[in-house]
Amino acid sequence: MKKTAIEREADWSGFLKRWPLESLASMSLEQYTAAGDQDCFVYWLEVRTESVGSIWGGSAFKFGIYSRRDKTEKSNESRHYGLEYAWYTKYGKTADEAFGRIRDVIISVANSARSGRLDLVDQADLGQAVKWKLAFLYQDRNAPCVLPVFKAEYLRAYLGSEEKRTSELQREILGNRFSGETSQGSIEGLFDYTDQVWDEAQRLLRTELSPADARAFFDGSDRFRLIKPPTRKMAGYQTIDGGQLALELERQATTIYLSAGDWLNAVDGLRDVDQYEPDRGRSSNLEANAPQLGLGGAVVKVVVPDMATLIGLCDAYENADAGSRETGFNALELKPRSTPPLNQILYGPPGTGKTFTAIDAALEILDPPFLAAHQNDRTALKVRFDSFSLSGHVRFVTFHQSFSYEDFVEGLRAETDENGQLHYDVADGVFKILCDAAAAKVIVQSDAPLNVSGRRIWKMSLGNSLGSDSYVFDECLEQGCVLLGYGRQLDFAGQSDRQVVQAHLAKHGYPSNADSYEATAVNMFVNKMKLGDLIIVTEGNFKFRAIGEITGNYRRINREEQGDDYVQCRNVKWLRIYKPSLPFDQLMHNQFSQMTLYELKASVIDFEKLATLLSNQDRPQHRESGGSAFRVGEQFGSGSGYTIVKASSDLLELRKPNGNLLPIGMSVLRTLADYIQRGQLSLEDIRTKRVFKKVSETGLEPNLVNGYANIIPQLVQHLLQTQDEKGHGPGDTAAPRVLIIDEINRGNISRIFGELITLIEPSKRAGGPEALEVTLPYSKRRFNVPQNVYLIGTMNTADRSLAGLDIALRRRFSFREMPPRPDLLDDIRVEGINIGELLRTMNQRIEVLLDRDHCLGHAFFVSLRENRTLGELERIFRLNIIPLLQEYFFEDWQRIQWILNDHRKPSPHRFVSKQSIDIGALFGSEATVSEDSGVWKVNDSAFGIIEAYLGIITPREANTL
């Protein structure tokens, strides 16, 4: 939490009390820097005065010299690493000599700031942030001349200035816009003004960054120089200390390559991070413009969304210890993105694994620990993903030309009521359903029955949420009851069955036919609904908003004051009330019917989800599915133990020590776990077979629970422990929700998103600094997008290039490129052919003849890893590669021939070839048909010849394989 101005002033005073200007001349090297000493000068400068202005991040070389924890001796041209200290060699040959010069610079900065000579601070040979923080701390507090904003880029952004000298920027920002006084109030005003400057500069620097903006930043900076004249596609730059980076010039997103290293851990806000191990292939443009980043070195590619992030990236990279810019990943632990972007698009050519990667991206959001633990177990990841999909935490939709706002947000849908009347209801689209589920809160919660077996479950509507009787639901919540509007205000006490109910209606002048729904509804409400039954209160056919338990018998109430027909009453205990309502798939296998009241059949209810909804939601939810709480192969029990051989959301199957199988329902383990959480049982009670004495009402099977008291307590304990893990279970209503939009670029974005395109921005979402709401056109309800809704789009660049994408979409999504990865195929050989080299060669030709957006993806060839046969390679080329090339080149067969190198192969080895035709014989002498005309044919026999594939690579290389 940001400190108040008074607290920051106190930190400032504390520094000056500990390190007054007059004490600097006698400061020793050990007082200046000592690893682990929280009273040394640099610790005070960086940590204990962080509140007045942060200089966190980057290398400790910013202090000129620092005390080392790593005692390994090493050196380079500009830096020396001794056993105790490391320092810039420009300051001296020994640690003492270097510190002496650094101390002189510090004293000069302090005196210059105290006297207002800021031009001398500019000239001081010390790190930019360090010297200006020193200037701030030692300035005359009665006449401030330095604002605690130490990045010149931020000052320039706020002032709208091109001035490069920080001293002039400080003078302008304080001299023209803030008048210092000697009172305490002026110090508070100084910090308030600092916050204003910082926030406004951040806002200005958070606008979208283009490659042209980034190039202008590098070209205009004294911190970087061009390595050589840039090519059309890339520009390479070098830091003062020799580190190199490269900027792509033709990308839509600002993409930068840098040497990999743990310096990246200090950078926040990057949209995408792609790690290149030393042997991973990369563009020849990269090595040409920044030789250090060529093949053989570890490189990281990042997408930089805005200028503020670029400044932070450059600070960290420029200040990095040269040793932290590694040539390999062995000692490198790049931090994962701490928070996945709310809106991201995976884009790339066909076959690069975009939809495949979307599963990992969803799990990174919903259950990152599970993703990390099972990174190489695709089956486990898919099972986990499927469990989230079944629970409604992940939804999948494909955009197409006909997809509309009504499909995505809300629209009108024709429905037939219980009387056969057609009417139109507002139906939510997939995005609104997901948002409502994400925003849903349990606003009323009571202890619920742990076992619902034997209880009937009823669906009931309590007024129309959009109609004139919408008040009925609120009234029922307040009074703890449910009200039925059928029955013509009559009293049906004692009317024992439907026939009697119908006769009672007729007796009072309301005759009806034999299949009248009114008589059916009243009879169910009065006679069939029993104490202990559950009621699901719906909102339309696609949502439910409450779960109740019937606690009272039928009674008629007086409604003269309200003037409506809702006089039939049953008391209920409200177990759960949700606001907004939950989508039906959080409970049901299919949507609700339009009828006001009817019994839900067991086949349409997901009892696992019902149990989850009724579990204690003020405690962490149990994580469902065998893919999380239990894993195949785990063992429980003593000795050889019980081994899990199957684990699903419904069933746990174990192999007993004697080899027999033991199936245990997950509902049994969850029920026992809930008893323990409620304090009704302990694990010891299960071990000592006291479950049925302590919880006599349970419906569990005694022979199972008591018969396996040696193993069930361990399983329950393991299930309970999973609630402490980080991550979200499929039954957790507070968990994030993910919408995967396949082929996002194929839809009409303006037509589909409508006014919601603005609301998906992080700052515009509910709870954000610029949160917005809209009134939806059909329901007329206020709507916003919750912070826990994530959008993952996939985009095939062969369908539409990134440059042609809707600008509204580009501004609001992070873009993560999914390029072809031939390096993943380099270890696959089919009869001597290196498949990685085969793909790499074809893509190089496609990039020259067409563009990089139409390359071939590595996923087409992945099946060869398990089936390394010519037959499988033939299948891939027949069904995938040749048809795709035909689509790419619009029947331009000559270019297809060039891609496949067929023009340099013997005729039997050519996949496509041109057949000569006698034009005169075919059309006659009067036809004006070009002599170049011919018929192109696919040579079926070539697909079964290994030399045809070898020849795709250059003939020389093909012959040497």
Image (spheres, rainbow, N blue to C red):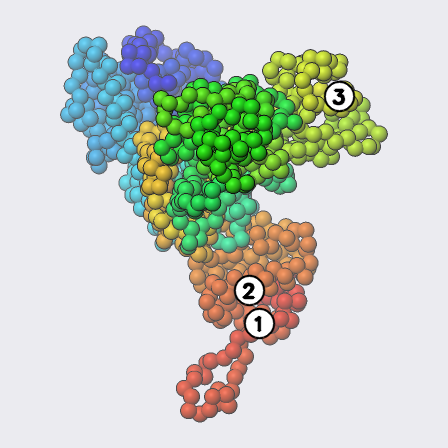
**Amino acid at pointer 1:** Val
Q: From this viewpoint, which residue is outermost toward the right?
A: 658
Residue at numbered disc 1: 938
Q: From the viewer's perspective, is the residue at label 3 or at label 2 nearer?
A: 3
**Amino acid at pointer 3:** Pro
Q: Nearer the viewer, residue 574 or 349?
A: 574
Q: Residue at x 23, y 18 (%)?
A: 190
- Disc 1: CA contacts within 10 A as few (<14), some (14-19) or many (>=20): some
Q: Which element carries disc 2, helix, strand or loop?
A: helix
Q: Quadrant of the C terminus?
A: bottom right
- Distance from the alpha carbon under mark 3 to that under mark 1: 70 Å
Q: Residue at x 48, y 53 (%)?
A: 349
Residue at numbered disc 2: 882
Residue at numbered disc 3: 702
Give the mark nearer the N terminus: 1 vs 2.
Answer: 2
Q: Position of residue 48 (x, y in %)?
A: 38, 14
Q: Which element carries disc 1, helix, strand or loop?
A: strand
- Distance from the alpha carbon under mark 1 to that under mark 2: 9 Å
- Total numbered badges shown on the rendered structure: 3
Can residue 165 be seen?
A: no
Q: For the residues labelled 1 and 2, say whether their Cβ atoms are less than 8 Å apart.
A: yes
Q: For the residues labelled 3 and 2, say whether their Cβ atoms are less than 8 Å apart.
A: no
- Distance from the alpha carbon under mark 3 to that under mark 2: 64 Å
Q: Residue at x 64, y 13 (%)?
A: 680
Q: Quadrant of residue 469?
A: top left
Q: Quadrant of residue 372?
A: top right
Q: Position of residue 47 (x, y in %)?
A: 39, 17
Q: Residue at x 56, y 52 (%)?
A: 858
Which label sits on residue 842?
none
Can residue 709 be seen?
A: yes
